[in-house]
Image (cartoon, rainbow, N blue to C red):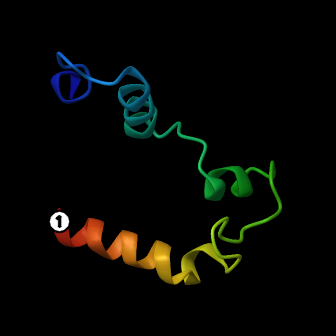
Amino acid sequence: MYNLLWFKGHIPCHSFILWLASLGHLHTMDRLHMVGIIKNTTCILFGHLFFHCHYSSLVWATNKANM
């Protein structure tokens, strides 16, 4: 995992965000909602419920297909 995140020429901000995500500490909207920090669960881009948003569904489907 170390070599995947911290390689020569990496972008520090990207590596840091991926490191947080790999540890399960990335504060995504769903995580913030689960702990009660935010109340709004709608998609920021389109205002739909996040998991019903066409764009986010397409992103997740594309990501799963590439795995």
Q: Secondary structure at mark 1?
A: helix
The x and y percentages for residue 50 are 61, 73
Q: At 70% from the left edge and 56% from the top edge, which residue is drawn?
A: 34
Quadrant for residue 66, please give it. bottom left
Quadrant of the drawing holding the N terminus: top left
Residue 18's place in the image compared with 57, above or below, is above
In the image, 58: left or right of 26?
left
The x and y percentages for residue 6 are 25, 19
In the image, 15: left or right of 52?
left
Quadrant for residue 53, please give it. bottom right
In the image, 41: left or right of 6?
right
In the image, 19: left or right of 63?
right
Q: Which residue in the structure is indicated by mark 1?
A: 66
| Residue lying furthest top | 8
Disc tally is 1
Crowd band around label 1 with a 10 angstrom C-alpha radius: few (<14), some (14–19), many (20+): few
Quadrant of the drawing holding the C terminus: bottom left
Residue type highlighted by circle 1 = Asn
The x and y percentages for residue 7 are 18, 19
Q: At 45% from the left edge and 33% from the top edge, which residue is drawn?
A: 17
Q: At 21% from the left edge and 19% from the top edge, which residue is drawn?
A: 9
Residue 38's place in the image compared with 7, above or below, is below
Residue 33's place in the image compared with 12, above or below, is below
The x and y percentages for residue 15 are 35, 27
Quadrant for residue 19, please give it. top left
